[in-house]
Image (cartoon, helix red, strand yellow):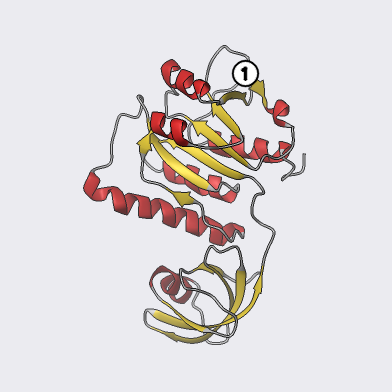
Amino acid sequence: MRNPRLFTDHPLTPGDQVVLKGNAAQHLGRALRARAGDHIALFNGDGQEFAAQVLTVSKGEITVDIGAAASPDTESLVHTTLGLCLSRGDRFDWAIQKATELGVSAIAPLHSERVDFGIPPDRMEKRVAHWQQIAISACEQCGRVKVPSITPPQALAFWVESVLAEQKWVLHCTEDTGVSASAVNQGAPRDAALLIGPEGGLTDQEFDVASAKGFQLLQLGPRVLRTETAPAAALSVLSVFWGEMPS
């Protein structure tokens, strides 16, 4: 069984001692019942993972000794930005979790014509923090050492206009042929952008706006995928044809 992995926002340097508080201390102390002498792994998003040993455990605080650093090969070679239209309930949370496990680098929640709800301004900061914690937890589980950034929700048209990427793909239900997944097999780009609509899909006008900004229609097969399933399917397929997953 591998040692528990935890994210911390502390600077990490071999030989230093760090006092963990908040979510990290609660998870390590309450859920994992850590004791002095236990070995864990820590990361802070800088691309490295550090061996660590628990020194002391007290209520709300755990002191650890930082050991050697390693650079596990768990990050994608492609910086992929996911533009994902908002959805209700836990669907959006699930999509963030799975996209993180599959190596996405950044997630941009999007408003579109068929997103029929909003997040009150006084709850926005809390909601974004909630999404960020989901990404952190997914990184802890899957072995990643960089945490995807998650922005506050923005208009789809603004994101399409501003996102920069070598390859841009959009999933959309249409009779147009588009590009099949196998056509993506052209080597891994430096960066990519993937646009996925809400329940009900993108409107034709939104698709046209994306197309005008260089987004190519990507076809994944004959079936219509739910908005929370589409990111996992698309990222998996792209990873295969970029050479990151075995075919």
Instruction: Check the picture and name the quadrant holding the C terminus.
Output: top right
* Residue located at (44% from left, 41% from top): 108
> Where's residue 134, x and y in %?
45, 54
Which residue is painted at 67% across and 66% down in the image? Answer: 71
Specify whether residue 111 is in view.
yes
In the picture, residue 171 is in which quadrant? top right
In this rendering, does residue 86 appear at all?
no
In the picture of the structure, the residue carrying the numbered disc 1 is: 178
Which image quarter is the N terminus in?
A: bottom right
Amino acid beneath label 1: Gly
Residue under the point 40% across and 28% down: 157
Task: Please tell me whether residue 238 is drawn above or below residue 204 in the rendered image.
Answer: below
Q: Residue at x 43, y 34 (%)?
A: 159
From the viewer's perspective, is residue 139 above or below residue 184? below
Residue 216 point in image, percent of width and height: 59, 24
- Side (left or right) of 32 relative to 205: right
In front of the other: 33 or 12: 12
Q: Residues within 10 Å of mark 1 (few under 14, many from 20)?
A: some
| Residue 223 pos. (x, y %) | 58, 22
210 relative to 79 in the view: left or right: left
